[in-house]
Image (cartoon, grey):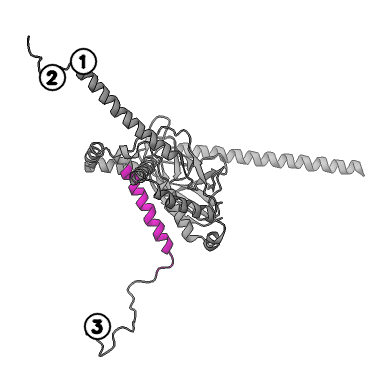
Amino acid sequence: MTDKPAGASGPFEELLRLQSNFQQKLAEETLNYLRQLQGMVGPVVPGTLVVPKTEHAVSVSACPGERAVLQFEASNRQRVHCLITPMLSPLVDASGTTWFAEAKISPSFKLLPADGRCLFTIELVVPKDISTGNYQGACLLYGYKDGAIPVHVAIRTAAKRSANTAKKAKKKVARKRAGKKTAKKLTKKRAGRRRSNR
Amino acid sequence: MVQSSPTVIRLVDLPEEAGRTTATLLSSLAMRLVTLHYTSGVSVIGSIIAGLSEAGREFRGTVEGRRFLRAFDKAGITKNGELIWESLRIADWARGLPPSPVLDHIRNDLALLLAEDLQEAMSAVPLPPESRYAGHQPKREDANFLDCLLGLLVYSRELTRSIEVLAEGHQEDTNTVEQHSGIRDGDAILR
């Protein structure tokens, strides 16, 4: 009868090993479950919700090498003081280009009393070598529920931007002229009605 | 320089809650202190670690947070920190526990210090403390070394700035001289 080689385990040892693993796992899961139970009911810590007044993002258009300033105004509608710490997320273009913007946020930290208001500015330095596109991200109001304000920065070349601004200016003039024409028509109609009423 | 037109946002109370008033903040603080009496130290520390990690996770999504993470990598501390974290099983302390809203604690306590009606709130009939039934908790990411480190940074910054802002505008000039009645001629401190 030969001796069993060292390291070989019989069925009984295997059973013991499995049982001790099971017991260990059971103890761990029980402890986790008890911890979860402990956290199920707890005191409420009153918080703050950020509500944007409109669905629009904070947006600006800029050229490479320029400085762009984003602004938002925070209004505290709670009955006690609020602390605001705005922070900027990375800005991402649809092509996947990520811009970790050098941003100067002013003020970087503000204590707002009840019904207080404060204007925050985020000054971005647009890199000279950035590719054009629509960069999207968020300004995070740190620690608040839904505390993110969407941010859009459109990077255009100088020529394209001046063409866009010229288009916008033309549209504005056309609207004004159309407005004047309709105003003239209306006054003529009213004058006509007055004559007929006499 | 190009500028956007300002967007307006409002900071309001959470729906289905009593809201942030002096009375509710006082009640919440009292409950937190009472809860300490029947909670073990391990659970408290675990909840704080989970809360700091959650704060760090939020900070990680910002430009400044990413900058710090890259700096930690370059400094070479990430590897050591994670090794300590795993070998001492620090994450196990936080696993399963609700994260403590560490930043809300600072902000609410600061608001209490600045409340003008604190005396009235204390002398009024005590509010029954609001408690929340969490129900089924969503599965959370385990606390890790880097998130906890970032959370500590943000927490300490918020705490320091909050205390500094309390004294803002009321600090006296430095390099002043004060006259005291002190020791007169002939008196001795030690006899």
* Chain assignment, label 2: A
Cα–Cα gap, marks 3 and 1: 85 Å
Q: Which residue is mark 2?
A: A7
**Residue occupying the point 43% across, 48% down:** B35
Q: Determine the secondary structure under disc 2.
A: loop
* Residue at the bottom extreme, as displayed: B186
Give the amino acid at mark 1.
Pro
User: Mark 1, chain letter?
Assistant: A
Q: Quadrant of residue A54?
A: top right
A165 or B41, which lies in front? B41
Which quarter of the image is occupied by the N terminus of chain A?
top left
Say what amino acid the circle numbered 2 marks.
Gly
Pointer 3: what residue?
Answer: B189
Element assignment for label 1: helix
Q: Comparing marks 3 and 1, which lies closer to the viewer?
A: 1
Q: Nearer the viewer, residue A15 or A80?
A: A15
Q: Is B21 one of the magenta-colored residues?
A: no
- Asked whether residue A32 appears in the rendered view, the answer is yes
Residue stretch rendered in magenta on the structure = B148-171
Distance Cα–Cα, label 2 vs label 1: 13 Å
Foreground residue among B83 and B62: B83
Q: Position of residue A93 (x, y in %)?
A: 42, 33
Query: Which of the numbered marks, if any, corresponds to residue A11?
Result: 1
How many neighbours does mark 2 have within 10 angstroms: few (below 14), some (14-19), or many (20 or more)? few
The amino acid type, in three-letter code, at marker 3 is: Ile
Quadrant position of the C terminus of chain A in the picture: top right
Which is in the foreground here, disc 3 or disc 2? Answer: 2
Residue A118, percent from left and from top: 51, 54
Tell me, yes or no, whether dots 2 and 1 are on the same chain: yes
Tell me if A18 is positioned left or right of A81 in this view: left
